[in-house]
Amino acid sequence: MFTVRTWAARTSAALLTTALSATGLAASGLAATAAAAPATPAVGPAPVGPAPAAPTPASDSPSPTPYQGWNTYYGLGGDFSADEVLDVADFLVSSGLADAGYDIVWLDGGWQADVPRGADGRLQGDPARFPDGMAALADEIHDRGLRAGIYTDAGPYIPGTCGLGSGGHYQTDADTFAEWGYDAVKVDFLCGITADLDPQEAFTAFSAALRDNSSGRPMIFNLCNPVTSPDWGDYPEEQQSTWSWTYAPEIAESWRTYTDVGFVGQIQFKDVLRNFDANARHPEVAGPGRFSDPDYLGPELGMTTEEFRTQMSLWTVAAAPLVISSDPRTLSQESMDILLDEDVLAIDQDRLGVQGTRVGDAGTTETWAKPLADGSVAVALLNRGDRPAEVATTARDLGLRGRSFEVLDTWTDARTQSAGTVRAAVPAHGAALLRITPTRPGGVPRLVASPPVFTSVGVDAVAPTTDLLAAAGDRLTTEVTLHNDGGTAVRSPHVTLAVPEGWSARPAGAAPRVVRPGGSATVAFTVSVPAETATGGYDVTASVSSASGRITTPPSHVTVAPAAPSGGDVVLSRHPWVSASSGWMEPTVDRSVGGGSPLTVAGVVHETGIGVATPSHVRYYLGGACTALTGSVGIDDVVGTVGPEGGTATFDVVGDGETLWSSSLVERGEAIAFDVDVTGVRDLTLDVGDAGDGGYNDRADWLTLTTTC
């Protein structure tokens, strides 16, 4: 956790007050709310530096609202051709993406020739892949009604470090891009950091060259310094992406706020959250014509559909550029629907241009709010957790005044009325994106149903959970809670439970006759799991029908586990786990993660255990049959073959949601033993965290795990 500088909160409040004054909402209090709770979920110490002046609308900006488009990098890598680019351009047009605003076809690194600069000193495209030249490609893109973007680096060309560099040629390259007809330029800093340049000086000079290009062509400048410690090594703060906010708003239409959100062909949800959090540090410097850039959208590059929908919600509330990084020709209809949603895009493209801020505390669930030009407020109710959850705020906390509010759920298109509570049942890794508008009382009351919560298994009560471990043959008790946040009663709600084929669900009590305004009601069910049910995960959802309409809850999960360990002392690493994760690598049994070498800590080899990268969660079903868990933890000696950076972790043993043992900080060169009482524990999780310094070079070991059952 880090503390935001007081001036940053004041500047953010002033910016929001200015924006709200234009719409008559200055007195609503949203600016004061932002000042009290600035958008800074912790990712590291806040940069210290002079606060740039609050931005003002730029009527002559080539991008007064966040630009949209497609970039080659994550989906096509660095070996793309003119034919591929134009085929994607055709798809942008035919699919409706271009009409929805995704109109920049942006070449990333890889377009250049093996020798990127010709005898005349000008950059040149690869002649085999771009036989007609780069100007012809831009013309072809323009002929389709689209804009063209291109890529370079602010540093001097250093073979083996970057594909091309504009260092020493800023004006020549700016003139060339303009002459070729490009509308946007992404300027990287790979060779810049290798040459130890000052990014502010380099990017400021490049910006001046772009603005003064010989053709007088307006071009969007995307300032892309991805250098971030510790991901890239140990660099002075002034050279990192997290410092760009101090100068970039005056020279660029957008600036990257953290390192890359993924790798070619791979974007993970945890890195999306990491980049969003870093992007949220300085909303006060963003505004019309100048936008914080958390990197690209990553549908179907490693995230689930729900996770991508969350990324879209967060980028939208952040007033971020929306640039598709996948190959759009390969996307499912679900992903296309997310990209094309008109209500969502309207929030991102709102002319007020305010970057949203967090309302309230950081945590597993959070509220993010963005004032809009028509006086409404866009709200993202975020659930970072691995289980569905209710997330709620109030119109008052959002700075809105009144007795009644229309709530538009942008993803479902449902319009309901609330008396002031803004609430949603949000899936794991999900976000509800709502638009809240003051209105007159009346309309469809807002009814919210919680995901089914399991409260007992067989005859044994369990901690209430939406993520239950069970055994074949168990009988479960679950409850669904209904909330009426509207101003009129909801009568005769009918609740049904959807369970897997072969399972049964029966009401365990009378259904409520009425849920009064501001009231709640609980409906219970008994669920039977057949004895022949196979090991695996199963979803249970609830549907609620009433005169107000029909709603369906996010799914709760029941995992039917392998049989519990038995027979005395059991080597747990060789018992089948329920699930296991390990950073961006696969966990390994009885071997160090990443290389497959024996588990070795402080020179001592251990025959059994689990090797993981951070963060990691390994889950076992004990079924209440065991009494003790012993073993030790440590950082595997293999980290020494990578380098001195990283190699720290924290370890936790969690039973039925309660932490039973914590290691505190674990560094290299020591194995730490533990002996934990697990009597009665059904659901055991072994968690490993990155100790707050990122997952670089973290190779953590659970050693000689033995459970007595």
Image: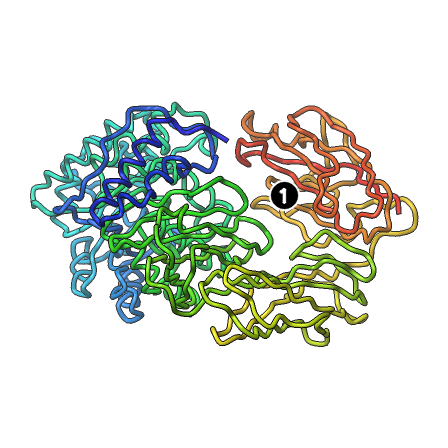
Count every numbered label the image shows and give the total: 1
- Looking at the image, residue 598 sits to the left or right of residue 425; the answer is right
- Looking at the image, residue 558 sits to the left or right of residue 62; the answer is right
* Secondary structure of the residue carrying numbered label 1: strand
- Looking at the image, residue 365 sits to the left or right of residue 286; the answer is right
Which image quadrant for residue 420? Answer: bottom left
Q: Position of residue 415 (x, y in %)?
A: 39, 67
Above or below residue 638? Residue 610 is below
| Residue at the right extreme of this rendering | 568
Q: Nearer the viewer, residue 645 or 459?
A: 459
Residue type highlighted by circle 1:
Ser
In this orientation, does residue 483 appear?
yes
Q: Position of residue 448 (x, y in %)?
A: 52, 63
Above or below residue 448? Residue 216 is above
Q: Position of residue 320 (x, y in %)?
A: 32, 48
Residue identified by numbered label 1: 616
- In this picture the colour scheme is rainbow
Picture residue at 28% right of the left edge, 32% below the top: 155
Q: Nearer the viewer, residue 355 or 321?
A: 355
Above or below residue 129? Residue 3 is above
Q: Nearer the viewer, residue 604 or 700?
A: 700
